[in-house]
Structures are given as C-alpha cells and as structure tokens.
Image (tube, coloured by chain):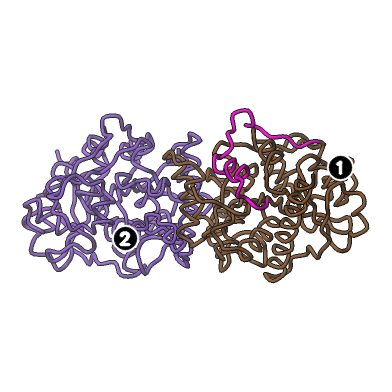
Chain colours: A purple, B brown
Amino acid sequence: MSRHRIVALSGGIGGAKLALGLYHALPRHELCVVVNTGDDFEPLGLSVSPDLDTVLYALAGLDNSDTGWGRRDETWTFMRALETLGGETWFQLGDGDLALHVERTRRLKAGEPLSAIVADAARRWGVAASILPMSDDPLRTIVETDEGTLPFQEYFVKRRCTPRVVAVRFTGIEAARPHPEVLAALSDETTEAIVICPSNPYLSIDPILAVPQVRAALAGASAPVIAVAPIVRGRAIKGPTGKIMTELGLPVSAAAVAAHYDGLLDGFVLDRADAALEREIAVPTLVTDTMMHDRDDKVRLAKAVLDFARSLTLADAGRRALP
Amino acid sequence: MSRHRIVALSGGIGGAKLALGLYHALPRHELCVVVNTGDDFEPLGLSVSPDLDTVLYALAGLDNSDTGWGRRDETWTFMRALETLGGETWFQLGDGDLALHVERTRRLKAGEPLSAIVADAARRWGVAASILPMSDDPLRTIVETDEGTLPFQEYFVKRRCTPRVVAVRFTGIEAARPHPEVLAALSDETTEAIVICPSNPYLSIDPILAVPQVRAALAGASAPVIAVAPIVRGRAIKGPTGKIMTELGLPVSAAAVAAHYDGLLDGFVLDRADAALEREIAVPTLVTDTMMHDRDDKVRLAKAVLDFARSLTLADAGRRALP
C-alpha cells in the first residue's frame, strides 16, 4: 500500500476536474482519489461505474473534454445498432467506453473486486495516482421524488433530473465495508490534506460519507479536511445541485454546502464571486477563483487548495505550540 | 407457426450464401433456415452465435461482403480499447455486432429462448424468412486434436484450425431438444425441399443432425433432401473442410461428402468441375455451377437446386404412379 500525501473525495465531472488539477500539481503517485460508486448501475446487463470511469478517463488523459464524460475520439456504432434492435438506449455507451464495461462485468462475475479492476485499468493506462471506489460492496443511491422512488441513473439520465427530489437515500449501507485503503489514507498521519472536491454534496459526496467508518475517519483525521464549493453565485457550476437544494428547502448557497459538511471541515474554499459569504462560514475560508475551464485553471485551483491546507496545518501547529 | 415451402440447413459463411440465394429465389416468407449453434460461445462473457448471426446479417442485408462475417460499415473502437485493457481480443467483435451480442446476453439471462431473440432481431431488421437455431438448448462442438481438446472457436479462430483433428464431438446432445418449428418444418407434407447448404459437414451440419429427432425427421421427410457439395475440385470452397477430411482419413472429394450424408439424401448437387464424380454418388445428381461470387450466382444456384428438387418430386410421383 503506497503512502499518499493528498486524498480527494470525488463524484463525477466536477470532482474529476479538481482531481486532475491535484494530479498535475503533485508528484502523481502521491494522490489518492476516493470515488463515489452510488451511481453505479447495470444498463443492458453491463456493470457501469460512471463516476469512477470519469475520474479514470480524466487522469488517463482519455476523457472527452467536450462532454465531460466518456472517452475522446469515441464512436457510436454500438448504440445505433442497438436502437435498431429495440434495446434500451437512454444511457449512452460509446464503443470505446463499452470495453471498460464489458471487461468490468466479466471480471466482477469472475469474483474480482471492483477496486482491483479499476487499479488494473489505471495501471495499464499509465495513471500513477490511486483511484479507489469508496467500497467494493454495492451501495446504491436512490432518489425519492414526487413521482416516486427512482434509482439514481433513472432520475439523473433517463428523467434528466426533472422530478422534484424529496429525499436521497442509499441502499446497501448496512453491508458496505469501506475499502481498507480508503480508511488507511484518511487516517494516515502522513496525509497532508483531504480535499472534498466540488461535487454534488447530496448525490456524490454523501454516498461516500454514508459508508460505515468513513465519516468518523474524516472527522478524526489529523490532516486538514477542506471542501471546495460546488456552488458559485447561488448556482451549481454543473448539474442539478442547485435544483436539489431548492427542493430540499435549502438556500442555494456555498454557505449551505459548508453547513452540510458541519463537523468534518477544517477549511472551505469559496469562489471570489462569493467572498461576501465568508462571514457565514464557521471554518477558515480561502477565497479564490474556483471555475475550472481548462487544465491551467484546474492545476492553479489545486495548488491554491494545497497551499491553504498547508497554512491550516501550520496554524494548527502554532496553536498547539502555545503554552 | 407459418408454413414454409423450403427448409435450408446452414452453418456460417458458405451456407449463408445459398440461404441468401434461396431467400431471393422464393417468396421470402416461404424459407426456413435451420442454423447450427454448435459454434456458439461466450467470449468476454457475451453470448455469441456466429452462424446464426452470419445468416441473420446476410438475409437482413447487413452483412459484410468483404469478410463474409460480421456487419457492413463496421467500426472497431471497442476492440482497440479492449486491447489497452488487456482483454481477450482473439475473437474480433465489431462495435455494431456487439449490439446483437449484448442484447442477446441480457435477454438470455432474463430467460428468453435464443430462437425468440433471433426472431425478434429478424423481424426488426425486416427479414421475412424464419431463421431458427436447431435447438434452444446449448449444444457445443468440441474438436479433439493432436494438441488436446479444444472448444470449437478456440480451434477455429484462436488456433486458426492448425491443430490436427482427431475427432469432432458435441456436448449437450443428451439434453438438447430440437426446436419444435424445426421438426415441424422438416416433417410438414407441404414442404417442397430440404436443402443442406454447402457448409462444413463435420463442423456445421453434423451438430444439427446430432440433435435428437432431427436426423430421423430428415430421413423420414416427404420432401426431397438435397445437399450441395462444399468441395469443388478436391478443395473446400472456404474454410477447413478439406483439411479436416484429410485428417479424418477421408478423400477430399464431393463424393465423400455425399457418402457422409448416406441415408438422408434424395439428391446431390455437384459442381460442373466435378462432373466426373457423378458415377460415385448413389443418389440423383445435379451438375451445375456451384461457386457463389455474387448475388446473381447465389440466386441462380438456389433456383437450380429448387428445380432439381421439383424434378425429384415429379420422378418420385411418377414411380409411385407405376402399377
């Protein structure tokens, strides 16, 4: 088990952007990305892990920067043929992307853990960071809506997040064991920062925190825990975070996200546009540009977050050194 | 259950050529093609039926006329990505072809019979003929070679037929039930001809005949049974038939193929180049051009075979009418 200096918690697209920034801001093997698997599902009988794959493709340089998901230079012959067969086509699977799903399905059925399959793909694709599912046990995000109970991908992709969210819950929590490397990385005294990426707190980060022992490991970590706001100027950077917050009766504000992580955080990163919110946030705050349009933005934000973590560690050491 | 005038028994590429000729020589719904499933296997955990698919693609006009297998306008992004993942790539699956395999795998697991899945694909792709697996039960062709026991596709594709064949056998025979429509079509008194296509007798037709009741139904059929030679001038038109005949100690000759079907045939179709073999064949023989380079060749041969069947029926009726 390699030692990691930095641990990032990530969902899909938004989280993968900062994970990529961290990957290029550090010696690459020093990064460990813990990824949500609550979105995993089985379209067409294939085991698909959308968030893991987004992070994997991003760090491997295989990602499609136009869409934010799937692979670059993708073809769509499979989907077109499937449509003529009357198959389900609401979840788009590119031809190259399918290779990962078909291999994963075969290897899971043969008894390999998800984490080993991801690690093997990462190794073959030259990714030096660790990419870990939060758990090798199945945990599934379920969205309770005004139109009934929906498995995550039916809510997210098939229904395009249109039903009103009443609650989000997770199945499989009782039996889910955290991946041992996740707990080790969070608890390791040599870990220098734990970064909660700007992913959807309710749909992407909460499933990670719902795995037994993970929240406690985060709360008890010696490394500073820093969350980056996924909300800027009262709007989600991407996806349904804002809509869901409204439906859950929350103000759509970075401050509400900080409050959501209450008890876990040592620091919070706000966009410059939201500097005025600083006084609403109970932990030390870094105000910086958080929008990540290109790779330079991602690396710059990653470095700012790492510097912020270092300053928190020094301040903490300073406080401890007081008589 | 629709009535069929003509029943064809077929393996893959060679058989599909004549099946296509018959399809265009008849009102299309009057053809029933009974296809070998002994080649079926599960590469990458997907249920693949190579001979069924070759016939299906041919009749649907989706076939790749350059290769004889797979689909036209195919892309190969999946295989390229799979290779980077270290997946098994010795059996080439095109991106469009994958749609049929993924859907078949899903539907078989959900409990649908293979024949229903094939019939649905045929219907959606506008194929008016019936394409039937000989059985919905798994029957597998096993090749005993000087290098050990090989499942069919490992012998045929992975090893490119290089090991020396000692024997061919079939697993699953005891439990295999013929598809009821196959038995009905063979036994139906309105059936006008049963055509054994120019497929490999040992690897493609024998598995069909090995299914309980099929050989007896063929032997007892009121329709004339006609085989078209897959050997011309002592060489297989395509594939390893000649090599296998040599290894099994048989002369590589159309006459040996006719002898192989002894007891089943009412007529045999020889290529013009082999006219001299006519005297070695125990049943009435049609000598004609059997090489099928283009669609016209296929339709012309199909019409010649159907005319030959009609002549055999008339001769038989003539003999019965004798005092």
Residue A306 position in % (x across, y down): 29, 55
Look at label 1 and name its amino acid: Glu
Q: Is residue B190 magenta?
A: yes
Tell me: A127 left or right of B212.
left
| Towards the viewer: A217 or B224 | B224
Answer yes or no: do the residues labelled 2 and 1 have beta carbons within 8 Å?
Answer: no
Residue A28 position, x and y percent, is 44, 54
Picture coordinates of residue B199 (x, y %)?
A: 73, 52
Which residue position holds label 1? B247
* The disc label shown at residue A303, or none: 2
Q: Which residues are magenta?
A: B167-193
Say if A198 sits above or below B108 in the image. Answer: below
Secondary element at image label 2: helix
Task: Name the subunit of mark 1.
Answer: B
Q: Is residue B289 left or right of residue A45?
A: right
Q: Residues within 10 Å of mark 2 (few under 14, many from 20)?
A: some
Residue at the (40%, 57%) spot, across then down: A86
- Tell me the chain of label 2: A
